[in-house]
Image (spheres, rainbow, N blue to C red):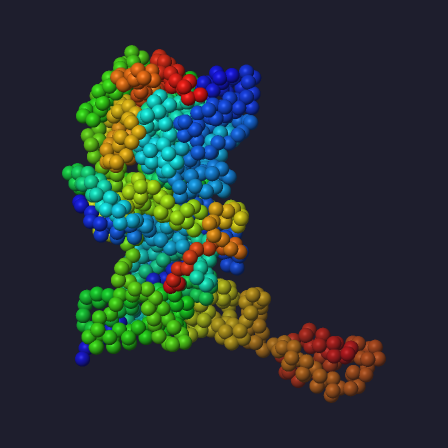
Amino acid sequence: MSDITSLTLTQTLQALKDKKFSEQELNSSYLNRINTLNSKLNIFLEVKKNTSGIPAGIKDVISTKNIQTTAGSKILSNYIPPYNATAVERLLEQGVSIIGKTNCDEFAMGSSGENSAYGPTKNPWDETKVPGGTSSGSAVAVASDCCVFALGSDTGGSIRQPASLCGVVGLKPSYGRVSRYGLIAAVSSFDTVGPITKSVEDASLVLDWISGGDNYDSNAKVEKFTLQPQGLKAGVKGLKVGMPKEYFGEGLDNSVKKVIEEAIEKLKELGAEIVEVSLPHSQYALAAYYILNPSEISSNLARYDGIRFGQSRETIGAEVKRRIMLGTYSLSSGYWDDYFAKAAKVRTLVKMDFEKAFESVDAIVGPVSPTVAWNLGEKVDDPLKMYLADIYTISANLAGIPGLSVPCGFSEGLLRSVNHERSLPVGLQILGKHFDEETILKVGYAYEQITDWHNQKPDLRFKI
Amino acid sequence: MKNYEPVMGLEVHVELNTKTKMFCRCSADYFGKQPNTHTCPVCLGLPGALPYINKQAIENCIKIGLALGCTISPTSLFERKNYFYPDLPKGFQTSQYRWPLCITGNLKLEDGNLIRINRVHQEEDTGKLTHLGGETLIDYNRSGVPLVEIVTEPDFKDTSQIKDYAKKLQQLFRYLGVSNADMEKGDMRLEANISVRPVGQKELPSYRVELKNINSFRFMVAAGEYEIKRQITALEKGEKISQETRGWDEDKKSTYVQRSKEEAHDYRYFPEPDLPQLTIDNGQLTILKTTIPELPWEKSKRYVEELEIKKADAEILAEDKKLAEFFEETLEHGVDAKDIANYIINKKIDIENTHPGQIIEQLKKKKTGVIDSLEELEKIAKKVIEENPNFVEIYKKGKTTVIMALVGAVMKKTSGKADAQKVRSILEQLLTK
Amino acid sequence: MSLTKDQVKKVAKLANLPLTSKEEEKYAGQLSKILEYVEQLNKVDTSDVEPTFNVSGKSNVLAEDQVRTSITQEDALANAPKKSEGFFVTKGVFNE
């Protein structure tokens, strides 16, 4: 039954309820697909042969009890956590089973999937392209129907960007919406755990499942997120949607710009009022990000000393080493005011930009990525060039606000006649106020329902 | 020939006696336990673990600060102190730096001098290292146990002041019930910063020598004395004094270099992102203030001034909170406080097994002169039995009422001051032997 | 802001990262470039701005002092590369 694996979570749950197939058939269908695709696409670092539960892929920076968790790094190649992350516990309580741990950039640092110590995951739409990062495996797993849904983490765009480059839905929740207990920390004040799914409704459901406080994460909001179907499907009539002028200027690829503008037109057709807004400190957000990010990273990675677990520190990869060095330098004696404190002040300004904009609009839309997926190897030698891939996503992490990426089309050009490959996916980013996932999911759902992008799947026949 | 004076400051670390650790709920009662049996992902520093603050520890830290006259910061933050050492599982200690819980307090010494306290802040303890051969064994049971750090300004002028201060702090911790403050067990740790400068110089010396890992007041005083002499000698010779960390060698009676401080640690402090800020308002402070008992030096002062007890006795009574409370319970009953003090101190009363009322009873009896010491009465009773063989015979023949005559004889011998009931039962015992 | 190989060496030591001479050189160049890029923050006027260290919006998140069961000694040591008689073992450090 090859149709089983193309079903969304919502459809799968209904089908199980209707006894269309059993959980065992569900799992074996997905396992078959993984068997045929994993070696080519390098999605999973570890696969579990379950016979029950709803199969989900868990990004390998999320702790799973008694299941290998590597963070995409050689230093944790033999690390087996003695506990589950809270988000994983919550999923298990809902009858989800872990079908595998998905590949990712090492310690969630990167923008392409190429920083994994276990080789990059391939983009299922075009294997010569990057899938995006750092939740590369999770995005590809969902895009290639190797699991019903997946969990990723987003520190500077790591859920939204691979979702956008792979044509699936990715939700970065508000900071504090989901407990970070068990998420291997990269940047503690930016990190979030969130769903990558086949539909917006699925994302809403998974967020419901994993959200809410616990006794471990001091920054987590106690109250759960819940959105009834009527709420999700309420539509966007009368909603004010902002377009930041800074996100449509230089740096944005024309083919992507075109697709995004068309998507926004659709929102207008649905009854939303499109308003121009300004986020004046956008140009400084990346610089602030690349001081705060390495600083916290340098401290969070100090525990990897090879005494209680893991290999020795020389097995850490280049990008991670680079960030540890950068962070150590910017925190070092005499520099705190110039770097960390300064960046933290600019962070306030970025946050205030959003607060001001949200006084006049309910949601903000724009591109997720300035380009579609680029060639493997193209940006690896230029760290700064790689960092620039994140310009539209990092501000949400600085401010702590939620962001959704929904598939909104494909770029033109690059139709390669050799393999009859399609052009590449583009994602629409929808940003909301802190703890207002409801509005962005509503907008995403309404858009999704009048388009067919979410039903497009990569042609993987040649791989099977 | 210059005259030099010491410039000294003290850092005290006290381990709190909370049930759980500072940032996780593992038991903090680690002493004598099997290694690594009181740990969890948090205090082991496993990937993905997060800290969660112990409320009781914060309250205890604030109480210490209040007792020392500190200002409690309306907002304070935890920060990461980053350095590598095997006993530090996260590779950083969650501590405080720029925004400590308590600042600017003071403690008055016996000699009337005031030691200014720079800060009282909260942090966590490290694991325990044991060195075996060329290897180091690590037990993380102690990792994460709450610590409070108290730092003074360099106000100490001689080592006896350091001892006085340390003893007072120890007393304070016990009074507040926040720690046993046992130097041998490591509940309380001292670190002194010693330097010297020419008398009359206002500026602080350009260096300081840190004295560490010294686990008694006595040794700290000895080490301090030694250091002062060593430094003065060096300066008089025109030598420069290295900034370093030294320990005390009790056998050699000298300090020795443990670690060179020329490359000072760069701890790269930054606010702990995993923990939201701590805020405290006046209402909460008022409530906490009410939980602070009268402090030992306040008590002994009050005993001297209000109860006219001599200073030495007042200090003994106030030293231990339980003893002071016992003493105070006896005060209501109309017996002179000085007499009670004397009695308690000289008779070395076991307060665990004595009720305050019993003391009062004793003293009242003494006043009225009742003799009820068993020893004394037995002595007299034996004598009466010796002197009255005919009454004894009558008693032994069955006429037990004759005992009253014997009781009467004892009463006559003690001019009526004997406790009649006790006399009777003693006689009965002796006669039935 | 240009980093010399020597500065990189110092930072690497502070960060407990063993680097080869080649790596030191490579990083000196790459880090300098990134530091140059972030210099633009100096253009932003932050004189009246408070820093943001935490976006949770929370304060005073405190737990009751109640013991929760620890993990077993076995679990604690399960991932240790070297252990002995319940202890983690590492190469000797010079005692203070």
Taking the image as shown, residue A447 lies to the left or right of residue B379, namely: left
Give above or below for A61 relative to B91.
above
In the image, residue A211 lies at what x, y percent?
A: 43, 31
The answer to whether one can see residue B89 in this image is: yes
Look at 77% across and 78% down and name the residue there: B433
In the image, residue B289 lies at what x, y percent?
A: 39, 53
Res. B259 image quadrant: bottom left
Of B361 and B183, the residue lying toward us: B183
Count every numbered label the image shows and give the total.
Answer: 0
Give above or below for B91 relative to A264.
below
In the image, residue B165 lies at what x, y percent?
A: 36, 67
Of B292 and A108, the residue lying toward us: A108
Quarter of the image where the N terminus of chain B is located: bottom left
Q: Residue furthest bottom?
A: B387
In the image, residue B138 lies at what x, y percent?
A: 46, 56
Give above or below for C5 relative to A136.
below
Look at 34% across and 53% down and name the residue there: B83
